[in-house]
Amino acid sequence: MSNVTVCARFRPRSSKEMRDPSRDGVCARPIDAETFVFQDDKEDEFTFSLDRVFYEDSTQAALYDFLALPIMRDAVNGINGTIITYGQTGAGKTYSMEGPGIHDCDDHNKGLLPRVVHGMFEQISSSNDFARYTVQLSMVEIYMEKVRDLLDLSKANIQIKENKTQGILLSGVTEVPVSDSAEALQHLCTGLANRAVGETQMNMSSSRSHCAYLFTIQQDSVKDKRVKTGKLILVDLAGSEKADKTGAEGRVLEEAKTINKSLSALGNVINALTSGSSSKANHIPYRDSKLTRILQDALGGNSRMALLCCCSPSTLNASETLSTLRFGMRCLLPITVQGKTHKSITTCQ
């Protein structure tokens, strides 16, 4: 069974999309909680089956319970995990990850990150008295293939190293010990204020960098003197986009090329992990980008990963949405049960 979970989330249509002159303006037709029919801009239809589909009326709580909660619990118990939001600029990645803001946000709207932080410390506080926990927080962005420390802007080019006992390390990165959720969220707010932001036609506050939130959770067992460490990484990816749609040029165009190259590398890594090919052929290309190198410990082996494909439901963005969904399909391991192929895409005749 695959350790990779892939979901799609369709946000509500924007005011611009509501003015779509097409017949209904919607490219996705729900079938059930796992399957939907998608119509592209050429009016071809595809049936997608994923682990779960969250439609326009989905709640942030439902998304957290299905996608993030199991991975967070495993990380507290020493199993590495990654939670990633992927998709076109303006498709709802940052809203799903953070909500309207990670601090002072109401319970209904808060995103995956504050929910994971609260859930992690709740689980730690409710654990038995036979273990002591320490939590370290780091926060980095990857911009133009350089890793910058968002908790200390003087560290603008963090190097990635590997240690036999500790695995992947960000050399010299700021690691802040946090003892409760309020302290963790305060540090996260500081880091988010430093994140590189640009403007495109798709989204006036489009994130131009990948942002990674890294939690290292160490569990010291008093009873048997054992130490377990879990690494939990949440990643809000930069938007996947086409230059002609965003109006990108000059420096912004170069940013887009670098973003798309690293997203392609991520897809190649996840696809290699789930392909089931022989060990000789199954080379995992972690070193093809800074993003995949940082995520190496939390993607391979027994690690768990959840990918949320954030999508626009509008026919205006059908080609970008189809590209996002196909990226998600590359990350799935097909499973055949009673003659039916699950986690798949089929073309409707």
Image: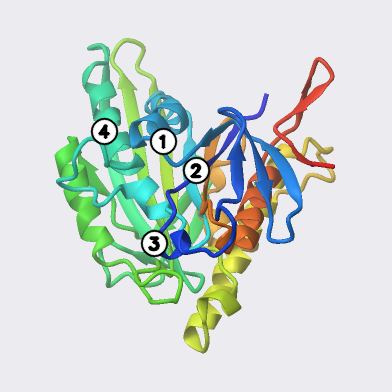
Q: Check residue 9 in the rendering and tell me which mark sits there, or answer none.
A: 2
| Kind of residue indicated by mark 4 | Thr
**Image quarter of the N terminus:** top right
SS state under label 3:
helix
Residue 40 image offset from top left, x and y in percent: 69, 55
**Residue 134 - label:** 4
Q: CA distance from mark 2 to mark 1?
A: 8 Å
Position of 152 compared to 307: left or right? left
Classify mark 2: residues with Cα within 10 Å, few (<14), some (14-19) or many (20+): many
Which amino acid lies under the numbered mark 1 shown in the image of this protein? Ser
Comes first in the chain, label 3 or label 4: 3
Sooner in the amino-acid sequence: mark 4 or mark 1: 1
- Name the image quarter holding residue 333: top right
Q: Which mark is residue 15?
A: 3
Residue located 22% across and 35% down the image = 107
Label 2: element kind: strand
Q: Would residue 286 be seen by someone viewing this image from the given angle?
A: no
Q: Residue at x 50, y 40 (%)?
A: 165
**Mark 3–mark 2 distance (CA, rounded to whole Å):** 18 Å
Tell me, yes or no, whether the two marked residues, 2 and 1, touch with CB atoms within 8 Å.
yes
Say which residue appears at 30% left-offset and 63% top-offset.
150
The answer to whether marks 1 and 3 mark residues whose Cβ atoms lie closer than 8 Å is: no
